[in-house]
Image (tube, rainbow, N blue to C red):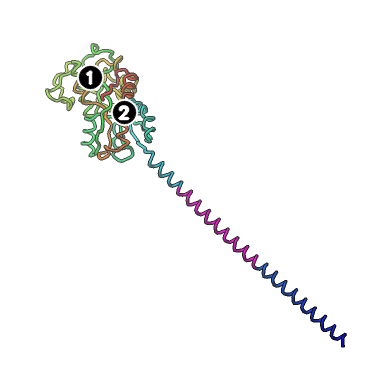
Amino acid sequence: MKKKLLALILALAMALALAACGNGDTTDDTADTTEDTTTTEEAEDTAEETEDADTEEAEDTDAEETSGDEAADSETAVLRVAASPTPHAEILEQVVDVLAEQGIELIITEYDDYIVPNTAVEEGEEDANYFQHQPYLDQFNEENGTHLVSVAAIHYEPFGIYPCTKSSLDELEEGDVVGVPNDATNEARALLLLQDAGLITLADGVGLEATTNDIVDNPYNLTFLEVEAAMLPNLTTECAIAAINGNYALQAGFSSAADALVTEDAESEAAQTYANVIVVEEGNEDNPAVQALVEALQSEAVREYIESTYEGNVLPIF
């Protein structure tokens, strides 16, 4: 009897021990499962936070780049100006750095004719030009239906009569050929200068509208070769003398002070009329970059440059 009771007690003790061991395993498994779940959730949260941070950083970078581009655009303006090589482009070069300090990039394009610089401004390819005087501009607008206006006078180039096959006016003979520009305003200017030199006489009152048809006295019976102004310096073997625009004379290496047989008087009607101007399309006169260009060109520094560089071939008019 005692032996059976002892066996029963041992059996119950073992059952309780096994139950206790089973409960411990369940707790451990639950803990492991909970830990795994927590770790996964933390990893997912961290990944989401990293992705959000990357997105925000990318957005901030894009915003900064856009802001930088907008700032660059707002701080830098481009001003394109068409010009004759000499002296216009050379004078413009003197203000490139001045305008750059104001956030304006001055781009100078050189032209060798009197047509394209105006059509380029009219068509918006250039913002302004610098090569002509007011009478030529007025004539060009009338003949071509363009809408160009001057905004400022910068300099004056004395028109001159230059030797070609004849070295002085005293050598002129009957029927000699005289080269003159073929555009109306510059031809009138040339004829007025020839009249001042005593070579021809024009009809009274024709002034700056004079043509060869207005010659009433021609004692040498001179013949006039009318060609594009830019071509005259290249025709010195075909003319006895030639009346040449100051800028083209400079390009050809002539000096009005040293080479010209006769030049316009600084107080003459022509000198006051034929100042070279900055020209823009109508409506663009108040463009801040254009106004900055005018101010820079009419500075004391540019005046000194003109006077010291061209020695009377180009005169500041401001």
Please provide percent x and percent y for residue 128.
31, 35
Residue 51, quarter of picture: bottom right
Residue 224, quarter of picture: top left
In the rendered structure, does residue 223 fall within the stretch colored magenta? no
Residue 150, quarter of picture: top left
- Residues at discs 2 and 1 in contact (Cβ within 8 Å): no
Seen at 60% across and 61% down, the residue is: 42
Numbered circle sitting on residue 102: none
Which residues lie in the magenta part?
34-63
Q: Amino acid type of disc 2?
A: Leu
Residue corresponding to mark 2? 297
In the rendered structure, does residue 45 fall within the stretch colored magenta? yes
Of marks 2 and 1, which one's residue comes earlier in the chain? Answer: 1
Residue corresponding to mark 1? 266
Secondary structure, mark 2, is: helix
Please provide percent x and percent y for residue 5.
84, 85
Q: Main secondary structure of the magenta part?
A: helix
Q: Nearer the viewer, residue 27 or 64?
A: 27
